């Protein structure tokens, strides 16, 4: 038996439309369709609205962050808040956009450089990066490659790869450590990282820099890692667990 479709191109109008809502949407569409910011008179003339009504709606939309008002020119335009309001819809349609937004938000929250790395041969390659807005920050370029045993992410890689002791030692020696950890200590940290599903590096790659990493793949061969690098300062997050929690949210989307 045929059934009625649940989706229609345009819903039936409500029995009692709310005039203020309809007017507000009309104003937003009017501003969005204009190449230049508009005066109140431009809006009321285009929409046939009462000036007092339009002004009250515009002031409300400005308060909510959906419309911006230039007091010098007395013109209105759409504001950033409208994009933020629509972002969850765009994110559902584009997982990559959602990942980028989450990486950016995490970088700003932690004051860190947050990166997604992919294992390629005996190296890791940077495939995505987000930086904080701090004046002093750690910069990476997409496409950069580093020895795969480097830093916090290297401890994760080493813990998930099947290889001989001699091969592991060779790759460890290939890392350009600034302050090399003792090999026995590093092996213990590799085992701890494998158990915990997260790894740290405190100043062994660069003095004063904390590195934190989590795997994207929970089981099996490790192909991708999410890592954060930040300067160890009084303002930096003091709890590695907080950093790891944020990185795992990113890994779940990657």
Image: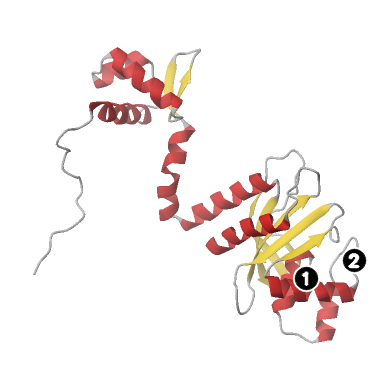
- The quadrant holding residue 143 is bottom right
Disc 1 to disc 2, C-alpha distance: 12 Å
Q: Position of residue 141 (x, y in %)?
A: 70, 53
Check disc 2 and report its element: helix, strand or loop. Answer: loop
Q: Closer to the camera, 253 or 119?
A: 253
Earlier in the chain: of badge 1 and badge 2, it is 1
Q: Quadrant of the N terminus?
A: bottom left
Residue 249 appears in the figure: yes
Asked if the residue at tag 2 contacts the one at tag 1, i.e. Cβ–Cβ closer than 8 Å, the answer is: no
Residue located 87% across and 54% down the image:
207
Describe residue 54's horizontal placement relative to residue 207 as left or right.
Answer: left
Residue appearing at x 70%, y 45% in the figure: 111
Residue carrying label 2: 180
Q: Which residue is mark 1?
A: 149
Picture layout, residue 11 above or below residue 183? above
Percent position of residue 209, x then y: 81, 53
* 184 vs 180: above or below: below
Q: Measured from the top left, where is residue 193 in percent x and y?
A: 73, 71
Q: Is residue 147 left or right of residue 7?
A: right
Q: Which mark is residue 130?
A: none
């Amino acid at each position: 038996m045929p059934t009625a479709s649940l989706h229609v191109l345009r819903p039936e109008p409500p029995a009692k439309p709310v005039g203020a809502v309809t007017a507000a949407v009309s104003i937003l569409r009017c501003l969005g369709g204009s190449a230049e910011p508009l005066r109140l008179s431009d809006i009321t003339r285009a929409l046939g609205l009462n000036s007092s009504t339009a002004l009250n709606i515009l002031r409300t939309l400005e308060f909510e962050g959906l419309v911006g008002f230039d007091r010098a020119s007395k013109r209105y335009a759409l504001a950033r808040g409208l994009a933020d309001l629509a972002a969850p819809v765009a994110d559902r349609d584009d997982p990559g956009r959602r990942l980028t937004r989450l990486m950016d938000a995490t970088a700003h929250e932690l004051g860190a450089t947050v990166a997604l790395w992919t294992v390629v041969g005996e190296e890791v390659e940077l495939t995505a990066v987000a930086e904080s807005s701090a004046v002093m920050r750690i910069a990476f370029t997409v496409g950069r490659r580093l020895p795969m045993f480097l830093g916090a992410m290297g401890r994760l890689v080493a813990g998930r790869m099947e290889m001989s002791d001699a091969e592991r030692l060779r790759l460890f020696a290939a890392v350009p450590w600034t302050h090399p950890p003792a090999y026995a200590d590093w092996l213990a940290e590799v085992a701890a990282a494998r158990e915990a599903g997260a790894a740290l590096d405190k100043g062994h790659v660069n003095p004063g820099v904390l590195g934190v990493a989590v795997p994207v793949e929970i089981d099996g061969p490790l192909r991708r890692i999410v890592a954060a690098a930040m300067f160890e300062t009084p303002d930096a997050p003091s709890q590695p667990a907080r950093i790891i929690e944020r990185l795992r949210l990113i890994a779940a989307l990657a």
